[in-house]
Image (cartoon, coloured by chain):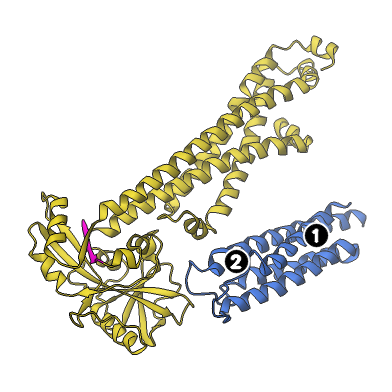
């Protein structure tokens, strides 16, 4: 296995944690009356962003030729994931709410880790390419 | 790689071994830094609670103790409301030994417009208040006007924003400094605003009326005169004012203090146990590593390296491992502790106030230095043994 594939594997795992987490243990607030707060929509956006990241990771794993470009395109996707909860989409207005206490910090950490992996992956795959040439 | 110093080359040459050592040290650093920050935060929370309570005695309606856990309102920010006649304030001031007394009125909102959660609204009399007002004054230089509110740091509303309580629009004029207690989740206003909100609540069907009249308060905070016996004043207040219970704030804090002492003790014992265990493992690991590398060192000796040079190299290698592990462990602890501080506070159910940035940085630097020191010290025995090994024998024995 090429070294440049390892970050893609890690990103794939992270994106799975993001997607499954958003639907289960990292889900935003559940309101008793069934109403949707703003954090619900932030959660949906995170779910979508996580799915896109997963697809990019799978592409980086499967298609060697596009690997550096895929890693680079994962960077803004991760930035979007970091900015979504609280900055781009509002969350509940109390720090003690689940969306601020659990979802937001977890997602920021997960997307930041994915971003770091994408950066490492981009450097490694660019190096491998220059070796070949 | 040839230009790198020899200890670093040795570490990079065996990444698995380096990673294992660094992980062990990272575990130590995580335990020390994480444990210390948690204990300091709990202590900070207790000190903050003491400072914020400010009063010696709190007078609440007799039913308050059963209606809502009064202590939980301060510690966890549980919402609740109970009322008594406003004349309790004057009666309290009549009691011998009472220096000053200030009323507060509580109102639990319905789901607030801002956050889909009940918030506790606390009305204070800025002229009399000596508990909350000094705290508000730090964030708001002028007096709160009508329909102005100051919000605790956990209410995510910025200054200038409007929040709605019982359909009344209140303007946020200040965000208060964190206290690590339930007071951080409350909204504060003056008594005129509170009366407006009480009327609005009445219209929504949330009654606060009591038999004796419309002018109501929820609690009276009492400061006892210097030299006066607080217990005696407490008993006097209990005897003098009917249907009211006088609670000593010390009794509220003692419970928290006991829980805190228990947690601090457990964390300290755990940290000590982890350190003893890890130091023993490190000592053994370094001895085994040196034995495994005896031929390598013998070759270096034959190539002209002195015993001192080899010992220094081993010490530097272990110190580098310590640095790597220390930084990784401290970083990981920070990554878990700071973003999830609110979650930790909720799980502990105790006042929890993070130390200041300077203290945290000092603690982090101290932890990294400690990790480097312990790693270097653990390899001292191994380095000493190494200096006594005869290169010829080591090469002949082949280990």
The residue located at (60%, 66%) in the rendering is A103
Dot 2 surroundings within 10 Å: few (below 14), some, or many (20 or more)?
many
Q: Of residues B250 and A43, which is closer to you in this image?
A: B250
* Image coordinates for residue B234, horizontal then vertical, percent: 16, 56
* Image coordinates for residue B280, horizontal then vertical, percent: 62, 26
The residue located at (62%, 76%) in the rendering is A42
Instruction: Work out which quarter of the rendered image holds the C terminus of chain B and state it.
Output: top right
Q: Which residues are magenta?
A: B56-62
Instruction: For chain A, give the colour.
Output: blue
Q: Of residues B56 and B8, which is closer to you in this image?
A: B56
- As displayed, is residue B76 above or below residue A90? above
Write down the quadrant of residue B201 in the picture. bottom left
* Image coordinates for residue A119, horizontal then vertical, percent: 73, 60
Q: Of the residues tagged 1 and 2, which is closer to the observer? A: 2
Q: CA distance from mark 1 to mark 2?
A: 24 Å
Answer with left or right where residue B267 lies relative to residue A8: left
Magenta highlight on residue B57:
yes
Chain of the residue where label 1 is placed in the rendered structure: A
Q: Of residues B265 and B18, which is closer to you in this image?
A: B265
Residue wearing tag 1 = A8
Under circle 1, the secondary element is helix
Task: Tell me if residue B177 can be seen.
Answer: no
Colour-to-chain, yellow = B
Dot 1 surroundings within 10 Å: few (below 14), some, or many (20 or more)?
many
- The dominant secondary structure in magenta is strand
Residue wearing tag 2 = A103
Answer with left or right where residue B361 lies relative to residue A75: left
Magenta highlight on residue B274:
no
Write down the quadrant of residue A4 in the picture. bottom right
């Amino acid at each position: 296995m090429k070294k440049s594939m390892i970050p893609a594997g890690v990103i794939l795992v992270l994106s799975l944690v993001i997607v499954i987490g958003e639907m289960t243990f990292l889900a935003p607030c559940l309101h008793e009356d069934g109403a949707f707060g703003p954090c619900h929509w932030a959660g949906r956006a995170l779910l979508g962003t996580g799915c896109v990241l997963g697809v990019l990771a799978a592409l980086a794993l499967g298609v060697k030729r596009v690997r550096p470009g895929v890693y680079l395109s994962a960077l803004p996707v991760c930035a979007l994931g970091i900015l979504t909860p609280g900055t781009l989409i509002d969350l509940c207005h109390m720090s003690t709410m689940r969306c601020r206490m659990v979802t937001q910090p977890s997602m920021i950490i997960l997307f930041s880790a994915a971003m770091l992996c994408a950066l490492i992956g981009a450097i490694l795959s660019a190096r491998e390419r220059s070796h070949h040439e | 790689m040839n230009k790198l110093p020899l200890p670093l080359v040795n570490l990079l040459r065996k990444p698995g071994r380096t990673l294992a050592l660094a992980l062990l040290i990272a575990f130590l650093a995580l335990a020390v830094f994480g444990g210390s920050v948690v204990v300091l935060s709990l202590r900070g929370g207790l000190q903050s609670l003491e400072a914020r309570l400010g009063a010696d005695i709190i007078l609440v309606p007799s039913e308050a103790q059963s209606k809502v856990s009064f202590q939980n309102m301060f510690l966890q920010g549980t919402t609740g409301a109970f009322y008594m006649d406003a004349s309790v304030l004057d009666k309290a001031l009549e009691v011998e030994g009472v220096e000053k007394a200030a009323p507060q009125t509580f109102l639990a909102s319905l789901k607030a417009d801002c956050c889909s959660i009940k918030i506790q609204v606390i009305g204070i009399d800025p002229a009399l208040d000596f508990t909350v007002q000094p705290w508000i004054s730090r964030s708001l230089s002028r007096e709160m006007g009508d329909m102005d509110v100051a919000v605790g740091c956990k209410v995510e509303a910025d200054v200038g924003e409007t929040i709605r309580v019982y359909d009344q629009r209140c303007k946020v004029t200040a965000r208060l400094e964190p206290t690590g207690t339930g007071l951080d989740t409350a909204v504060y206003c003056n008594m005129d605003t509170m009366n407006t909100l009480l009327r609005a609540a009445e219209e929504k069907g949330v009654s606060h009326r009591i038999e004796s009249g419309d002018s109501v308060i929820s609690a009276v905070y009492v400061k006892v005169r210097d030299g006066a016996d607080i217990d005696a004043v407490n008993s006097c207040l209990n005897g003098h004012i009917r249907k009211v219970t006088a609670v000593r704030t010390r009794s509220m804090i003692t419970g928290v203090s006991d829980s805190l002492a228990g947690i601090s003790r457990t964390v300290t014992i755990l940290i000590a146990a982890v350190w003893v265990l890890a130091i023993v493992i490190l000592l053994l690991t370094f001895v085994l590593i040196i034995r495994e590398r005896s031929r390598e060192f013998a070759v270096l000796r034959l190539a002209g390296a002195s015993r001192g040079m080899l010992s220094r190299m081993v010490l530097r290698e272990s110190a580098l491992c310590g640095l790597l592990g220390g930084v990784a462990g401290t970083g990981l602890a920070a990554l878990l502790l700071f973003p999830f501080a609110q979650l930790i506070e909720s799980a502990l159910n105790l006042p929890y106030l993070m130390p200041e940035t300077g203290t945290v940085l000092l603690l982090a630097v101290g932890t990294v230095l400690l990790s480097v020191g312990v790693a270097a010290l653990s390899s001292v025995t191994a380095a000493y043994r190494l200096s006594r090994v005869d290169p010829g024998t080591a090469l002949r024995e082949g280990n």
